[in-house]
Amino acid sequence: MDYNFRDIEQKWQKHWRDTNAYQVKNDADKPAYYVLDMFPYPSGAGLHVGHPLGYIASDIFSRYKRLKGFNVLHPMGYDSFGLPAEQYAIETGQHPAVTTEKNINTFRTQLDKIGFSYDWSRELRTSDPRYYKWTQWIFLLLFDSWYDREEKKARPIADLINLFETAGSRSVQRRDASVEAFTGGDWKSFSEKQQQDILMHYRLAFSSYGEVNWCEALGTVLANDEVVNGVSERGGYPVIKKKMRQWYLRITEYADRLLQGLEDISFSESLKEQQRNWIGKSQGAEITFPVKSDAGNATAGVDLVNDLTLTVYTTRPDTIFGVDFMVLAPEHDLVAKITTDGQRAAIDEYLTYVKSRSDRERMAEVKQITGCFTGAYAINPFDGKEIPIWIAEYVLAGYGTGAIMAVPCGDQRDFGFARHFNIPITNIIGDHFTGEEANPTKEALLEQSGFLNGMMMKDAMEVALQKIESAGVGKRQVNYRMRDAGFSRQRYWGEPFPITWNNGVATPLSEKELPLELPHVDHYKPGPEGEGPLANITDWVNLPDGATRETSTMPGYAGSSWYFLRYMDPHNEAEFCSRKASDYWKQVDLYIGGTEHAVGHLLYSRLWTKVLFDLGYVSYDEPFKKLLNQGMIQGSSRFVYRVKGTSQFVSSGLKSQYDTNPLHVDVNLVDGYELDLKAFKNWRPDYANAEFILENGKYICGSEVEKMSKSKLNTVNPDWIVDKFGADTFRMYEMFLGPVEMSKPWDTKGIEGVHRFLRKLWRLFYDEQKGRVWNDDIPVDAELKILHRTIRKIEDDTEKFSFNTAVSAFMVCVNDLLEIKCHKRLVLEKVLILLTPYAPHISEELWQQLGNGGSILDASYPPFIEKYLIETNKDYPVSINGKVRTNIGIALNASQEEVEKIVLSNDIVQKWLEGKQPKKIIYVKNKMINMVV
RNA sequence: GCCCGGGUGGCGGAAUUGGUAGACGCAGCAGACUCAAAAUCUGCCGUUCGCAAGGAUGUGCUGGUUCGAUUCCAGUCCCGGGCACCA
């Protein structure tokens, strides 16, 4: 009787399907546990061996938790809105809904082969109207909410209207300068449009004109994180700034809470760091300087022409006496007002130059120093010093106040600028400044610094801040690098906004009008003025009452920002997720996925959860308790070397003797590094007549580790691995490859070893000749020892997500049992339960063969039995804890007797031994390592 | 440039967190079974000296702490990832 994995796996997958084995209910006596995978975008390429890595890990953990007695929610779905499907539609004319459906079916078939324990009755798709109805609903909730800075939480917009009616704009902190102060009376006298315009400055989902990343080639606006180095992440097309009306999420209001929340959740340090970086909190001060300029009054000789002031943001108020010049962003409002007549021509020329430069150029030429003097001066409020005001590209309009105070001795950019334009440098840090480069230290004693003289810079910070505030020239200020998140795309394949425009006022649809379904279009070309394809459908856009529909659609991250909630209550038609369901399942206990969503999806879903929490729809404000980032499985590409201009291919070792072109060759035609010459000739017609220059009779390919992708011919399809070795082998092998978090190249070679392990396992139960070999004998200590050691190891490793070492432990266990010919049912059935999460099919099969009537799903995981070991089996070596070891201070050259004497007379050891004598003491080079009691 | 990770055999990777470095697997070598091959099994497998027992050496490099360091500390060199005019 042989290990026939094909029949076994088919049998059990069918059984699980027929019995709905993995369907879970929203109530149980058991504690709830939620294990979630980042749902995939169903691309046309299907799965390669890299994709299931995280799914296998999460499946192992789900099955483990289930056996541990938890009610486990482990769902799967599809993030089925997105650009690639639309791009494909543009190229082929196929409707995205059609290709998406097709791709999903491919995914499902592939996933099913691996034997996942998903509850498919909860499957969801973000492009399904039954799903995006609620995405739209949450959007309207965001639209209908504002952030109360006093209470630090979102509240309904109706509350804000109440406040405005009673106390006008004073009632809440001002959001931005363009909202002018008004009284309660004013508010009531405002027109509907005026009121709505003001409210738009407070809504969490709001529409505004703003500079957006416009990508001509894609015909759409991109989010900051979709732009990399000035070009689009997808396709690498140039991106420029363009003013357009867009929707945004006011994520900046949540910056602090998003930062705070990181403290309580278990994400990897590097991922938290990425989010902190993205949020970019900095503490400092805004300082206001009077401005002196003769702008427009040169002939009159007037110095201070008006009460213009310049406000800068700095993180180093302690360097206030080291300011040698000011720099404004070229777009700063003040530029036009303060430029002197004498400098106007130069400034205009510079502004023209700046405008001519694309974002791309600006980023590529960071090192290039440019700028222009305005002719105006700012006055240092503490010593009256006149400080020249410049404008320069390196100061960004969008951050802080768009203006800085430059301290060349402490900041390298300021230093470079001063050098380039010959601006004299004031040294306030003595020897710490060499004159050759800036020194950003906080450890220097201040000089030439008025009331700060002689103080350590980091101490001077607080003194300066207090003085600035008491003198009324500025205030403490916290700034964030993060901007509000762009939330609209000029695209077709996304959620339509449930919004109509009525004389410039955005009006939400009512709940019963949801979902606003995506209308059918005949083509996917952009609409006029860069609008999305929806703008072309005039009878959809134009409503009978004269209003028009919003024509942009929501971005890819809309649907994925809350999908984990929908799984809890997937068929609810009255709510996005009932409070009862979300209270039962609570947060996602374990979330597994790649690191590429660090600042996108993972930040937005945290935001949405916080808003839903504030408004009372869920009971927690962080969606994911623990995040495990799986590494990427890279491809190991193979190359052949064609001698230029011939059809000769030279083996890798000899290629230096010829002038060659390296060409990717399909990894499936290569065994290790040796090319299958016949298969290569049959592969493509133009290689049919290939000739080979061999080394030692073989053609050896070159290799390189690259991202796994179709174009590099290095993808390995899980389907044929499963066909050849079985799903259990595949699952265990993917885990055996190394820690899940680590990226590693795929190598099919080692899979034999894991497959061999499963066949060995089979032999614990059946012999080829003798058939059944397992028996009902009572296990002896030696056998129990192997079992218990394994239980402990597997459980420890699984809890730590160290699946690779767990698989190793299985191998050791099975080898040991075979060696001592242990075929006892009492041992074997426990091994099977241990193994189930890792290799569910073979475990179930053998479990049934053992005559255990029920499903292995109902069996319970053997509990960790350390106590048992110590109390009943005294032969286990027990380490003395680290403290005992280090404190005893065993001398290097002492004899064993001396060592024993010292150790045994030690108080802690005595206490630990409780008066008993050790059976055996283990020495290594005269040093006591372990004691056996 | 800044911020995170990480450097261990021919390879993927272990090491109870300061206690016998190299578990487990792959590859390799030798042997058993076989007419032969496959499959399976057994043994060996960091380097070096030695017939052997055994010795020396060894976790990127240089130091330090310690009875003892892959593990902790300081410096340094590589590799991977993220951010990048954010004042």
Image (cartoon, coloured by chain):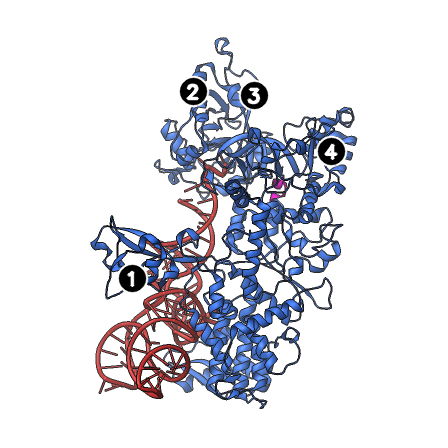
Chain colours: A blue, B red
Q: Locate residue A313, reporting x and y percent.
A: 53, 33
| Both labels 4 and 2 in a single chain | yes
- Circle nearer the N terminus (3, 4): 4
Q: Which mark is residue A847?
A: none
Q: Which residue is the site of mark 1?
A: A700
Q: Which mark is residue A349?
A: 2
Residue interval drawn in magenta: A250-255
- Circle nearer the N terminus (4, 1): 4
| Both labels 3 and 2 in a single chain | yes
For image coordinates 36% across by 30% down, the residue present is A419
Q: Is residue A468 visible?
A: yes
Q: Locate residue A542, reporting x and y percent.
A: 68, 30
Tell me the mark number nearer the camera, choosing from 3 and 1. 1
- Residue A808 versus residue A327: which sits nearer the camera? A808
CA separation, marks 3 and 2?
24 Å
Tell me the mark number nearer the camera, choosing from 4 and 2. 2
Q: Locate residue A14, reporting x and y percent.
A: 61, 69
